[in-house]
Image (cartoon, grey):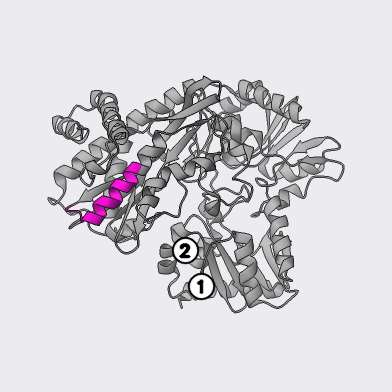
Amino acid sequence: MNSSISSRLSALRIFLKDHGLNGWIVPTADPHLSEYVDEHYAFRKWLSGFTGSAGSLLVTQDAAALVTDSRYWVQAEQQLEGSGIELVKLNQGYAAESADWFAAHLMANDCVGINSELISGKDAKNYARVFAEKHLHLSLVRQTPEETIWEERPERAEKPIFDHAVSPRNREQKLTSLREVLKKEGADYLLTSKLDDIAWIFNLRGSDVPDNPVFYAYALIPSKGTATLFINEEKVPANLRELLFRDGVALAPYHCVGKTLASLSSGTVLADPEEINASLLSHLPEQITQLELPNPIERMKALKTPEEINLISDAMIKDGVALVRFFAWLDRNLGKEEMTEQSLADKLLFFRKSLPGYISLSFETISAFGSNAALPHYQPDKSGGAQIKGNGFLLIDSGAQFPEGTTDITRTKLIGKATDLMKEDYTAVLRANIRLAMAVFPDGISSQLLDPLGREPIWQHFANFGHGTGHGVGFFLNVHEGPQRISYPRISPRSDAFISKETAMSEGMVTSDEPGIYRPGRWGIRIENLVATEFAEENEFGRFLKFKTLTLCPIDLSAVIPERLQPDEKKWLNEYHTLVRQKVLPHIHDERTIVWLVWNTREI
C-alpha cells in the first residue's frame, strides 16, 4: 500500500474513533459546492491520490472506496493502484452508491459523518433518507478532519477581484431584473453561494479557483434596498469599493454570512437547497420562511444577449487564430522534433498567451495520444506523457478565458495512418456532431430531449459514450454552467432533470456539442464546438430555435470517409470550413500558416 495514503487514512480513522463515528464521506467540494475547487479544499485528492474532478471517498475503520463516474474509471484504477482504496463505479447516484457500500461494511445503526459545509441542503436530506433505508445514520459535522489531520494544508486563495468592464449589462440592470423576479416569487431576499452566479450578478471577476474567473464570496440580495456581498474586503480595490457602493452593494466579511442570516427577524428567503450547503442553511432562523426554488440568477446568466454573443464570437476568432497557428506548427514539425502530450499542451498555451486580452485557460488542457485518448479526462503525468509518434489519434480538449468570453474546443487529429475502424469511428463522431449542430427544435424543449441527436450516428455504429453530449458555457465565467445540459437521464445527477422546466432550451444559451467514441486501450475520438441557441421560425406550430456554431477551427479531414456523410452533413461541413477560413484568415500573416488553413478548410 502507498505509505503516504495509508498514513493519511489512518489519521482520518483516529479522528472517526475520537468522534464516535463509524465512517466518513469526503466529497469533491468546497463550501460553495463548486465543480472545480481550490487546492485548499482538495481534501479527497490529498487523502486518496485520485486527481479527477469528480468523486467521493468513503472510509471506515477497515476499508475505503472511491465512487466516481465513467469518465474517470480507467484513471481511478490507475491512480488507486496500491492504495488499498477500491473503485466503486457510479451507476445509480452518489447517495445510493455510498449507502450500499457503507451497508456492506458497517453494522446496523452505525453512524457516517460528512462535513456539513460540503453537502447541499437537498443532498443532506437525500443521503439521510437513503442511509436510513439501510439502517445507517448520517451525521452532519462542523468540526471536520481536514482542520486537524491535513498537514501543510494550502492556504485558501484570496486574490484581488476586478470589474468585468466589457459586459453589455451593468450591475444596476442585472440587480433590477433580479429584484423583479424576487418580487414575482414573493421573496424578500435571495441567498446565493454559487461563485459564478455571484460574479455574474455583480459584474465582478476573480481568480481564486484555477481557470475559473470567480472569487470566494456569498451574497444576500433583498427585493429592495442594499445588496450585501460577503467577501474578504482586502480583495476589493478601493476604486471598486466606491463603484459597488454607488450601485447599492455593501461589503461584509466573508465569515459573517451565517451571523447575518441568523439575525434576520422576518421575511422570506429564496435559498436553493441544491446550491447552498447544509451548514449555511442551518443558520436561517425559525421565523424565516425558506423558499426552496432554483436560484433565478442561473437562468438569467445562461441567456446571453445578442451583444454578449457578439463578444463571445470575438473571443472565438482570437482562439481560432491560436488553434490554427498551433495545428499548422504541429504539421510542420511532426517527426522533426520530439513531442509529448504535455509539450503539445504547453505549445498551445504559448500560442494562446500571445493573443491580446488572454486571461487564462478555461480548464487544464487534455492532451492525449493513442490509448490515452480513450480516457475522456486524461492528464499526462510528470514525465510529459506519451510521445507523439507512430499511428494514432491525438485528442486535444482545451479552452481559454478572455474578457469577451470563454472558449472550449476539442479536436481529434490523425497522426500517421488510420485503420478502417478508426475511420469509421471518426466519421460517426463527426456525423453526430453535425447532426446536433443542424438541429431545429421547439422553443422551451428540455435540453435532455436533444441528446439522441448527438448520439444517433454513433448508436447506428453500435457504439456509445458515457459523458453528456453538451453543457452550458459561461460569458467569461465557468466553462461548465447550467441550467441546460444535453444528456439523457441515465447520466443526469438530478432525478427530475429530464422534465424540469429549468433545463428548457432558450435563445441566447451557449452550449457545447461534443459527442465521442472511446475504445479502451486503443483510441478515443471527440469533436467539440460551442453553439449559440438562436431563433429559427415562428408559425402556427409555435416558435422554433436552432443552433449557430461559434467555435472557429478546422475539423481534421484525414480520417473522414466522405461517402458516409449525408448530403446535408457534407454541405454543413463545407460551409463551416468556409466560415472558419473567412473569419480566421484575415488575422493570419504567416504564409505557411495561411497555406495550411486554406488546405485544411477545403471542400470535400
Q: Position of residue 350 (x, y in %)?
A: 29, 41
The stretch drawn in magenta includes residue 423:
yes
Left or right? Give the position of 97 relative to 338.
right
Tell how many labels: 2
Residue type pointed to by label 2: Phe
**Kind of residue sitting beneath label 1:** Ile
**Image quadrant where residue 298 sits:** top right
Q: Judge by depth and name the residue closer to the eye, 535 or 599.
A: 535
Q: Is residue 285 above or below residue 509?
A: below
First-in-chain label (1 vs 2): 2
> Left of 215 or right of it: where is 568?
left
Q: Position of residue 3 (x, y in %)?
A: 47, 76
* Position of residue 269 measured from the top left corner of the image (x, y, whole percent): 77, 37
Density class for disc 2 (Cα within 10 Å; few <14, some 14-19, many ≥20) is many
What label sits on residue 85 in the rendered view?
1
Left or right placement of residue 160 versus residue 312 in this view: right
Determine whether the residue tagged by mark 1 lies in a helix, strand or loop. loop
Mark-to-mark CA distance, 1 and 2:
10 Å
* For the residues bearing labels 1 and 2, Cβ distance under 8 angstroms: yes
Give the answer, above or below, for where 142 lies relative to 575. below
Q: Secondary structure at mark 2?
A: loop
Residue 444 position by quadrant: top right
Magenta segment: does it hold 593?
Answer: no
The answer to whether residue 336 shows anywhere in this view is yes
Q: Quadrant of the C terminus?
A: top left
Residue where numbered disc 2 is placed: 50
What type of secondary structure mainly makes up the magenta span?
Answer: helix
Which mark, by number, is residue 368?
none
Q: Which residues are magenta?
A: 416-431
